[in-house]
Amino acid sequence: MELEILRKFGKPELATLYIGRYNNEIVEFVESVQPPFTQKEKWVLILSTLYGCPIGCLMCDAGEYYHGKISKKGMWQQLHYMISAKYPDLNVPVKKFKIQFARMGEPSLNEAVLELLADLPHLLNAPGLIPCISTVAPVKASNFFKELLKIKQEYYRNGHFQLQFSIHSTNQKERRSIIPIPIWTFDEISHYGNIWHEAGDRKITLNFAVGEGVELNPENLIPYFDPEKFLIKITPINPTNQAKQNKLNSKITSDMLNNQIICDSFRKLGYETILSIGEWEENQIGSNCGQYATKIIHGEVKLKENYTCSEYEIPL
Ligand code: SF4
């Protein structure tokens, strides 16, 4: 089984989205650079771990369908495609080389993610490697998290792993309505994070994709999350089909003053806070997580037709 590349979108100097077919299913993966850093200084690869996603978060198109887990080989092929194009010998001399298990799919629902994480240090010669797991923390993935901790302790100490929890609201009840499956409470995330975090590690990220009208009361976090171990990341809600259907508008907009006020409310309590608004252009490309895959699955984008559906299409 080999990965077939079907379409490419983006701007290679910033980000390229690949749509591929593997095992008769659609996969999406991305490579990006983040100016002012050069690609040699910072290179970010984002791969899919599931075909769609069974969780169905209110703002995410990947949750519109679920066709199963991507095998270790299927995940590795996404990475190999991007890495070998630049580094055929798999020696990657990039200073900060992030591999994010964060495109389509909740990674903790796929045990093969653990196998790949344990293999990566052997598959690549990449001294700057930093894998990133971004998770909603499903209750049923507790065993995954136990194993993940062991893998991090064996291979990725001293700042070589980034762990991120999707929080979205400081109100736990509201959080559960945005992420509609049984998920860890703040107490459980905090307990795990306190075991996870050792001297030299990166702080654990608490990500808020901030919707209008959603509770953001940083003081609610203080009893659970030590600012010495956890940091805050504020992101917009992207205008996905699901976000539109669920009338979830972003509180983070191009109004930078408003964004700063939100960030400062966390900073005042001692939290390091990152505002990550990415590229506004990405919304025009329509390349937010799962958007193309869902269109393809629903037959809205026909793969065989010879047409350009976006000015951002890159010829194969
Ligand atoms: S945000 Fe993540 S967990 Fe939620 S539906 Fe999308 S891929 Fe799944």
Image (cartoon, grey):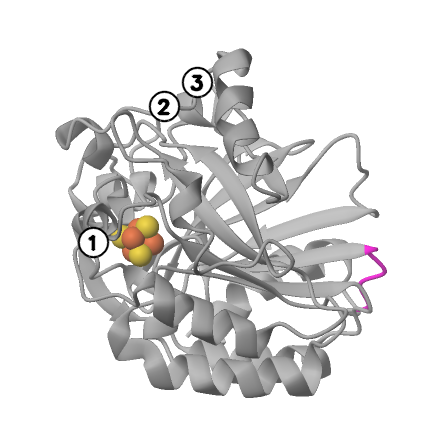
Residue that carries the numbered disc 3 in the rendered image? 253
Circle 2 Cα neighbour tier, 10 Å, few/some/many (<14 / 14–19 / ≥20): some
Disc 1, SS: helix
The mark found on residue 251 in the picture is: 2
Circle 1 Cα neighbour tier, 10 Å, few/some/many (<14 / 14–19 / ≥20): some
- The answer to which of marks 1 and 3 sits earlier in the sequence is 1
Q: Which residues are magenta?
A: 91-95
**Quadrant in which residue 122 is drawn:** bottom right
Residue placed most toward the observer, 137 or 92: 137
Q: Main secondary structure of the magenta part?
A: loop
Eyeballing the image, is 263 above or below 173?
Answer: above
Residue 10 is left or right of residue 61, and the answer is: right
Residue type at mark 2?
Answer: Lys
- Residues at marks 3 and 2 touching, judged by CB atoms closer than 8 Å: yes
Q: Position of residue 303 (x, y in %)?
A: 30, 41
Residue that carries the numbered disc 1 in the rendered image? 176
Residue placed most toward the observer, 262 or 306: 262
Q: Position of residue 186 (x, y in %)?
A: 35, 62
